[in-house]
Amino acid sequence: TEEGDVKMHDILHDLASYIGGNEYSHASPTAHTRHLSIFAVDNVEATMRNASAVANKSRTLLSGSLPMVQFTNFKWMRVLSLMKCHIHELPNSIENLSLLKYLDLSFSGVRQLPNSIGKLWNLQTLNLNHSEIEELPNEMGELSNLRYLGLEHTTRLNFIAEGLGKLTNLRTLKRFLVCDDKGDIRGCNIRELKDLNKLKGHLSVEGLDGGRVKVIDAKDAHLKEKHELTGVELDFK
């Protein structure tokens, strides 16, 4: 609920203030700021410009909005949360966040990821749950350290490019969309699951309707060898 969100933001604000001391800033970053939260700010763009200029050693940025900003100066960033942010795409300059480990785009308006997303080699968590994401680029396969890929309730998602099978460190992937049946050989084949043997929990495989998946490809996915999966749902809708 909206009230619950406000309470949660208050709790996070108080906790971060207590832990971070003068290294935490709600909206007035300084050269000492390491953790920056931008919510309910009158001029977000000015705040972000100021942060880019003086708080270039920030490790954490939590923001409910993202104006036209370049990430060139935020090379030390480890955590970036844009949950519920009303943006359709990320700037290509996100490639400068090479140390980023956590990227939260859940409930956001993001529809596509830039190809430069593949430069985030240290990324471990990419949360796209409940977002407006429509497709995942081939460069996703370069995120070799990714552990968590959240795609739950992404109703607009219709295409995942091949390459997901390279993410052999993935622990959590609750939704996999077979996409190579639509005349586009760039799409994900169910075989991409073959080497994802660290997957845990529940996995839903979608896009199996109309005999799209060949038996040989399904066998090559080696689903039986993923012993830490507690359940696999095959969606033929």
Image (cartoon, rainbow, N blue to C red):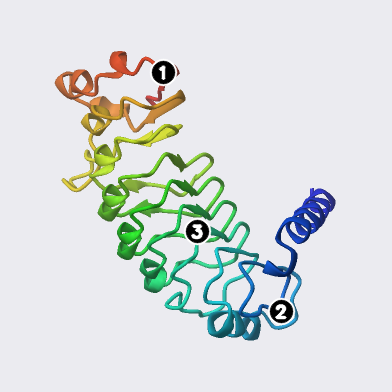
Label 1: how many Cα within 10 Å (few below 14, some 14–19, many 20+): some
Mark pair 3, 2: CA separation: 20 Å
Residue 228, label in figure = 1
- For marks 1 and 2, the one nearer the N-term is 2
Amino acid at pointer 2: Ser
Q: What residue sits 78% from the left and 57% below the top?
A: 18
Query: Which type of secondary structure does the marked residue at label 3 adopt?
Result: loop
* Residue denoted by label 2: 28
- The residue at the point 41 percent across, 51 percent down is 123
On the image, the x and y values in percent for residue 37 come to 68, 66
Q: Position of residue 119 (x, y in %)?
A: 31, 61
Image point (81%, 48%), residue name = 4
Q: How many marks?
A: 3
Q: Residues within 10 Å of mark 3 (few under 14, many from 20)?
A: many
Q: Quadrant of the C terminus?
A: top left
Q: Quadrant of residue 43?
A: bottom right
- The residue beneath circle 3 is 78
Q: Secondary structure at mark 1?
A: loop
Distance in Å between CA atoms under marks 1 and 2: 46 Å
Amino acid type at circle 1 is Glu
Q: Position of residue 148 (x, y in %)?
A: 45, 40
Q: Position of residue 220 (x, y in %)?
A: 18, 22
Dot in front, 1 or 2: 2
Q: Does label 3 or label 2 sit earlier along the sequence? A: 2
**Displayed quadrant of residue 194:** top left
Q: Going by the image, does 9 lie left or right of 218?
A: right
Residue 66 lies left or right of residue 111; in this view the side is right
Q: Is residue 105 left or right of residue 15?
A: left
Q: Which mark is residue 112?
A: none
Along the viewing direction, whichever of 138 and 226 lies nearer the viewer: 226
- In this rendering, position of residue 70 left or right of residue 64: left
